[in-house]
Amino acid sequence: MSYIADKNCPEEAVSTFNNGFNCAQAVISTYSERYGLEKELAFKVSCAFGGGICRTGDTCGAVTGALMVLGLQYGMSKAGDDQKKQETYARAAEFIDRFRSRNGSIVCRDLLGCDISKPEGSKAAKENRLFETICPKMVRDAAEILDDMLK
């Protein structure tokens, strides 16, 4: 399946995030329908990945959402299809390298500068409006990298 950039995906992803969906949901839902995955199902399947996977501060949700998109594009769907599996892993590794190169990390707590899995970190993130300033940039960066990789 070839990818056609028919809309401004980075802007749509940021808009989706700003409308109350988490970072993973914002990224995967922007691309999901072109792969036959309804937006509603994309929102549901990615819901637990926000906040660095269930607000643990681990891997950034924008990254996990993007990796899901790469799986939709390149992933294996038949047992034993090692070529597709390896291609998917290679593309995912490239995405991670590019995201890390732009942002210094793929880890939510590193990107935010606080650990949102702890009450004091969550409070600091809210008080400092990090979800309004840093997270939209991560969503945009993930979508920009995806757009480039899916060309």
Image: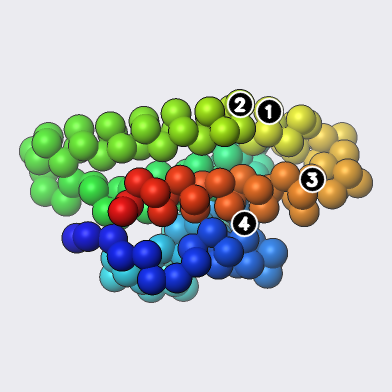
Choose between 97 and 42: the one closer to the eye.
97
The colour scheme of the drawn protein is rainbow
Q: Nearer the viewer, mark 4 or mark 2?
A: 2
Earlier sequence position, callout 4 versus callout 2: 4
Residue drawn at (49%, 50%), measured in percent from left and top?
Answer: 144
Q: In this view, does 39 lie to the left or right of 126?
A: left
Q: Nearer the viewer, mark 1 or mark 2?
A: 2
Residue under numbered circle 1: 110
Residue drawn at (28%, 32%), measured in percent from left and top?
Answer: 90
Density class for disc 4 (Cα within 10 Å; few <14, some 14-19, many ≥20) is many
Choose between 62 and 8: the one closer to the eye.
8
Density class for disc 2 (Cα within 10 Å; few <14, some 14-19, many ≥20) is few
Q: Do the residues labelled 4 and 3 touch (CB within 8 Å)?
A: no
Q: Which amino acid does label 4 sit on?
A: Asn
Q: Are marks 1 and 2 in contact (CB under 8 Å)?
A: yes
Q: Which of marks 3 and 2 is in front?
A: 2
Distance CA(mark 1)–CA(mark 4): 18 Å
Choose between 7 and 38: the one closer to the eye.
7
- Tell me where residue 89 sits by quadrant: top left
In this view, 150 is above or below 17: above
